[in-house]
Image (cartoon, rainbow, N blue to C red):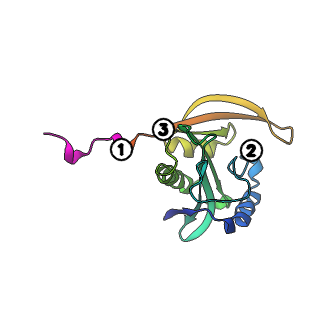
Amino acid sequence: MTVTLRPFLSDDLKQHIAWAEAIDARRYMSRIFPKRFNGNLIDNNPYFCWYVIIYNDTDVGSVWLEKENANDNVTQLGIIIGDEDLLGKGIGRKAIEQAILNSQSTMPSSIVRLNVRKNNKRAQSCYMACGFCVVSQGVKTNDYGERIEFFTMEKEIPNISLQPNAKDSVG
């Protein structure tokens, strides 16, 4: 299985919406775009990094990390895989790990946070496999008046630049 990422482009918007509709994303998530996405994609965006997920040479979804403020040390994660037959195959785990690593060079953070619905056990398993832990829980009402119970999960990101290089250690 090969999972890679490429930058999300304006031409991907139509397909992204189709992925969300194909899986009825409203069942899983409150929004399908980064919060600060206003219809325009710009290079070096300080608020979000957005990628298309490629599985065995086919575009299958997207993943993004975003910040409320450019200087925040916390990023929020969002992901859509647009084919229910592909869920539970490890694609999301690999895409999340790559997206976190890729985003650190342009949008560094030490914590990645997400909200996941309590009834979305498959997604919770994926996030735990990526190293996320539940830190709180809550309830919100969505735009359709539905009561949504959720967990907030976080993952700490080590500062790679501070890790000692094995070749530099004195022995």
Measure the C-alpha gap from mark 2 to mark 1. Answer: 35 Å
Question: What residue is at 40 percent from the left and 40 percent from the top?
Answer: 159
How dense is the environment of label 1, judged by Cα within 10 Å: few (below 14), some, or many (20 and up)? few
For disc 3, the marked residue is: 110
Q: Is residue 87 visible?
A: no
Residue type, label 3: Ser
Is residue 153 found inside the magenta-colored segment of the image? no
Which residues, given as a range, are shown in magenta? 161-171
What whole-number distance in Å separates the C-alpha atoms at marks 3 and 1? 12 Å
**Sequence-first disc among 2 and 1:** 2
x then y, percent, for residue 40: 70, 59
Say which residue label 2 marks.
30
Residue 124 shown left or right of residue 94 in the figure: right
At mark 1, the secondary structure is: helix
Location of residue 156 in the rendering, given as x and y in whole percent from the top left corner: 48, 37
Residue 85, quarter of picture: bottom right
Q: Is residue 46 visible?
A: yes
In this view, the residue in front, 83 or 99, is 99
Residue at the spot x=61%, y=62% of the render? Answer: 8
Disc 2 crowd, CA 10 A, few/some/many (<14, 14-19, 20+) = some
Q: Which residue is mark 1?
A: 161
For this orientation, the residue located farthest to the bottom is 57
Residue 13 figure quarter? bottom right
Q: Are marks 3 and 2 in contact (CB under 8 Å)?
A: no
Left or right of 171: which side holds 143? right
Residue type beneath disc 1: Ser
